[in-house]
């Protein structure tokens, strides 16, 4: 499916579609639910541009590769190049914010972890990153104090607040830019709070980002 970044009102944004740079383990409650070992260095990984797809009105999941887990995350759209950037440069380069799902093939990931292998294929498959429209930075003043949630079939599954990030938005993007140059149209995922779990075809999802976004969508049957 072709994908283009759009604004919250559905207008195309004049930026190319680039890579998605993600952080693992950025909320303590998710680290606890996964019983993950933490390290002082951040855990960064990349989803290719082909992972991006529209979040609504529906998205699909691989039918035959084991459990596909939701990870609801604040997404940041980058508007200017960033390399070894300080916090002020990062702030200036942000175009806006949205919500995305970092879809994860959890069984595949677990097998790869056990073998000590990279888990790229569990996170980077086509359609692994459904994302909503973006709210412009000027419309969203307190990006580090935003409540967000995911309901699946009417039941609350994830309820996070960006205030609980271990690495804040400016810090994590600054650190990412020490490893990977970020280009206009790239997107950053800021990590998931607790409440990851399997999605199934036919599930109805509701995602909310404070008063800025309220999306209903479903997993295609
Ligand atoms: Zn994630």
Image (cartoon, helix red, strand yellow):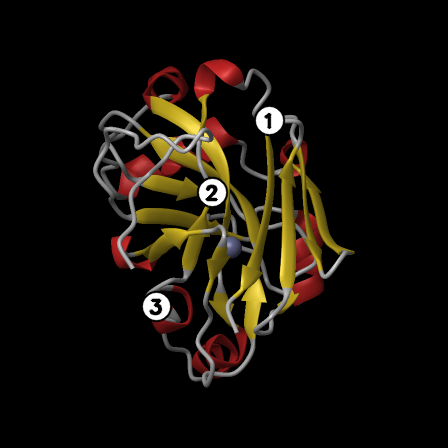
- Disc 3 marks which residue? 125
Return the residue nearer the eye: 169 or 148: 148
Q: Residues within 10 Å of mark 1 (few under 14, many from 20)?
A: some
Q: Secondary structure at mark 3?
A: loop
Ligand 1 closer than 8 Å to label 3 CB: no
Label 2 vs 3, first from the N-terminus: 3
x then y, percent, for residue 27: 63, 47
Q: Pointers 2 and 3 in contact (CB under 8 A)?
A: no
Q: Residues within 10 Å of mark 3 (few under 14, many from 20)?
A: some
Label 2 vs 1, first from the N-terminus: 2
Decide: is 13 above or below 159.
above
Question: Disc 3 vs disc 1: which is toward the camera?
Answer: 3
Decide: is 11 above or below 139.
below
Task: Residue at 43%, 84% (x, y): give it.
Answer: 115
CA distance for labels 3 and 1: 29 Å
x then y, percent, for residue 137: 45, 19
Task: Residue at 66%, 56% (x, y): give it.
Answer: 30
- Disc 1 marks which residue? 144
Task: Residue at 36%, 35% (x, y): give it.
Answer: 6
- Disc 2 marks which residue? 132
Please tell me how many numbered marks the rendered image carries.
Answer: 3
x then y, percent, for residue 60: 45, 67
Camera sees residue 43: no
Return the residue nearer the eye: 148 or 205: 205
């Amino acid at each position: 499916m072709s994908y283009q970044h759009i604004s919250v009102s559905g207008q195309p944004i004049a930026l190319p579609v680039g890579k998605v740079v993600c952080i693992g383990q950025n909320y303590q409650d998710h680290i606890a639910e996964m019983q993950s070992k933490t390290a002082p260095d951040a855990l960064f990984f990349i989803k290719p541009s082909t992972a991006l797809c529209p979040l609504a009105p529906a998205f699909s999941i691989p039918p035959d590769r084991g459990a596909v887990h939701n990870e609801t995350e604040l997404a940041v759209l980058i508007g200017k190049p960033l390399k070894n950037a300080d916090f002020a440069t990062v702030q200036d380069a942000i175009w806006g914010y949205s919500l995305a799902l970092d879809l994860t093939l959890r069984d595949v990931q677990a097998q790869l972890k056990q073998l000590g292998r990279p888990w790229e294929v569990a996170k980077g498959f086509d359609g692994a990153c459904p994302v909503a429209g973006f709210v412009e930075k000027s419309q969203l003043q307190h990006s580090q104090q935003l409540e967000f949630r995911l309901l699946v079939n009417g039941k609350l599954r994830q309820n996070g607040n960006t205030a609980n990030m271990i690495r804040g938005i400016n810090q994590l993007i600054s650190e990412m830019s020490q490893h990977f140059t970020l280009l206009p149209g790239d997107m950053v995922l800021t990590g998931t709070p607790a409440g990851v779990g399997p999605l199934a075809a036919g599930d109805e999802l509701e995602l909310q980002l404070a008063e800025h976004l309220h999306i209903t969508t479903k997993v295609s049957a």
